[in-house]
């Protein structure tokens, strides 16, 4: 799971800040963990939680199986 928070969309949405490089880093870290703990999980899923605080409102978006 990756959680990103922004106070505006001036530089893009929270989801847009997750770059291909970041995705690869997360996947590699997960694979290392799974290799070191083989009985912990049989499968993995990467979700994104984005939180946008703008105009005194909070917008939460949960993207299941994002990558």
Image (cartoon, grey):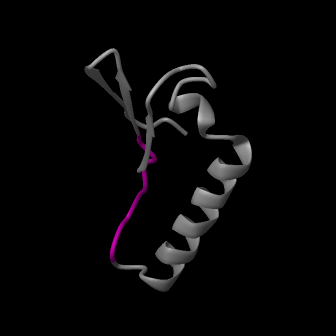
Looking at the image, which is closer to me, 34 or 5? 5
Question: Quick one: 54 or 16, which is closer to the camera?
Answer: 54
Which residue does the image show at 41% across and 58% down from the upper left? 43
Q: Is residue 42 magenta?
A: yes
Quarter of the rendering containing residue 4:
top left
Picture quadrant of residue 59:
top left
Q: How many numbered circles does the render carry?
A: 0
Relative to residue 21, is residue 50 depicted above or below? Answer: above
Q: In screen coordinates, is 21 left or right of 66? A: right
> Which percent across, then down, holds residue 45?
43, 49
Residue 58 as seen in the image, left or right of residue 49: left
Q: Is residue 44 positioned above or below 18 on the image?
A: below
Magenta stretch prevailing secondary structure: loop
The structure residue drawn at horizontal position 68% and vertical position 54%, both measured from the top left corner, is 24
Q: Residue furthest left?
A: 57
The residue nearer to you, when weighing 30 against 16, is: 16
Q: Position of residue 13 (x, y in %)?
A: 53, 24
Residue drawn at x 71%, y 42% as measured from the top left = 20
**Front residue of 1 and 30:** 1
Relative to residue 2, is residue 16 drawn left or right? right
Residue 31 within the segment the image draws in magenta: no
- Give residue 12's position: percent from left, percent from top: 60, 23
Residue lying at the far top of the rendered structure: 55
**Residue drawn at point x = 60 percent, y = 40 percent:** 18
In the image as oriented, which residue stretches furthest toward the bottom?
A: 36
Q: Which residues are magenta?
A: 40-48
Question: Could you say where residue 37 lies in the image, as x and y percent from the top left?
Answer: 42, 82
39 lies above or below 21: below
């Amino acid at each position: 799971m990756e959680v990103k928070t922004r106070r505006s969309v001036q530089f893009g949405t929270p989801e847009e800040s997750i770059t291909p490089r970041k995705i690869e880093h997360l996947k590699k870290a997960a694979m290392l963990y799974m290799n070191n703990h083989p009985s912990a999980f049989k499968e993995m899923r990467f979700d994104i939680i984005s939180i946008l605080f703008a105009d005194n409102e909070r917008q939460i978006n949960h993207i299941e199986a994002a990558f």
